[in-house]
């Protein structure tokens, strides 16, 4: 039984991690076998990429993140899908198209680098008004050098622009969630509804 691969992308502070956690709880409660994960992964390459964005940048960071992505697919995501689980991944290829282009890496190069990454069954864009994102990042604190003040509007725009490129590259159209207007519980219910419909289609 092949499982279902769900990815959540979007600007910093949009609510991806909150929603990923909630999806894990709600899917499990509804009796779906579920595997929650994130990129960069929690393996050695992913840990390096996640915590060393001050050290690594540009092509080096793009390759590090891509190497972690392929290893994560081979050793964790692929095997979980094979058991029939719904795999929910906090950040995926869209993050590379947006963050690594902000770091000066040409988009064509990133498309080639990520061409062999498994395409998700459901791709979710979690977003919100940039002013709200800035407020949340100020309250919560930045996770990396990509989340500096004033970056939210650029990032939100780049995720929107990335949608068309991702479709050309074989990704499904984004399912958009605006966390400025939709509470996490409501957003999770909408995604689970999509997952149920995709599962019943076989
Ligand atoms: N739907 C929502 N409504 C209101 N606040 C939310 C919502 N989702 C998340 N938040 C709040 O916004 C902040 C950022 O959420 P979270 O850490 O989940 O975002 P993220 O997209 O994973 O961020 P990052 O990309 O920086 O890891 C948190 O303080 C969280 O409680
Ligand atoms: C998937 C992905 C991630 N990154 C960077 C961006 C951040 O510094 C971390 C992720 O941390 P967060 O808590 O989810 O904000 O990894 C990247 O540069 N490129 C990628 O493709």
Image (cartoon, helix red, strand yellow):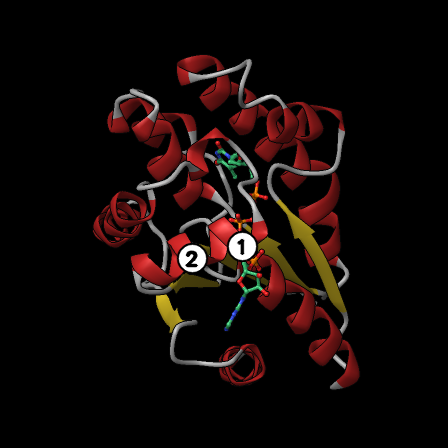
In the picture, residue 89 is in which quadrant? bottom right
Point out the image quarter for the C terminus: bottom right
Please tell me which residue is depicted at 34% across the width and 63% down the height of the picture: 174
Q: CB atoms at circles 1 and 2 under 8 Å apart?
A: yes
Residue named by callout 2: 135
Residue named by callout 1: 139
Return the residue nearer the eye: 100 or 109: 100
Q: Is residue 185 above or below residue 8?
A: below
Query: Dot 1, crowdedness within 10 Å: few (<14), some or many (≥20)?
Result: few
Return the residue nearer the eye: 98 or 165: 98
Q: Is residue 198 in view from this perspective?
A: no
Instruction: Give the spatial CA distance, label 1 vs label 2.
Output: 6 Å
Residue 99 in the image: x percent, y percent?
38, 34
Q: Does residue 188 appear to the left or right of 171 in the view shown?
A: right
Please tell me which residue is depicted at 53% across the width and 33% down the height of the picture: 144
Please tell me which residue is depicted at 70% across the width and 29% down the height of the picture: 47
Residue 201 in the image: x percent, y percent?
51, 82
At mark 1, the secondary structure is helix
Query: Dot 2, crowdedness within 10 Å: few (<14), some or many (≥20)?
Result: some
């Amino acid at each position: 039984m092949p499982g279902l691969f769900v990815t959540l992308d979007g600007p910093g502070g949009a609510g991806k991690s909150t929603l990923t956690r909630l999806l894990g709880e709600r899917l499990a409660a509804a009796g779906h076998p579920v595997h929650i994960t994130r990129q960069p992964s929690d393996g050695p390459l992913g840990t390096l990429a996640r915590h060393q964005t001050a050290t690594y940048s540009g092509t080096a960071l793009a390759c590090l993140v891509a190497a972690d992505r392929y290893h994560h697919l081979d050793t964790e995501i692929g095997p979980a899908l094979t058991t029939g689980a719904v795999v929910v991944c906090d950040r995926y290829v869209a993050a590379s198209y947006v963050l690594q282009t902000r770091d000066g890496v040409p988009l064509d190069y990133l498309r080639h680098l990520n061409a062999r990454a498994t395409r998700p069954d459901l791709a979710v864009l979690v977003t919100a008004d940039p002013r709200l994102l800035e407020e949340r990042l100020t309250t919560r604190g930045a996770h990396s050098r990509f989340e500096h003040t004033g970056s939210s509007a650029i990032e939100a725009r780049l995720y929107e622009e990335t949608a068309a490129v991702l479709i050309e590259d074989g990704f499904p159209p984004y399912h958009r969630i605006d966390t400025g207007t939709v509470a996490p519980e409501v957003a999770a219910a909408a995604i689970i509804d999509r997952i149920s419909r995709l599962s019943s289609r076989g």
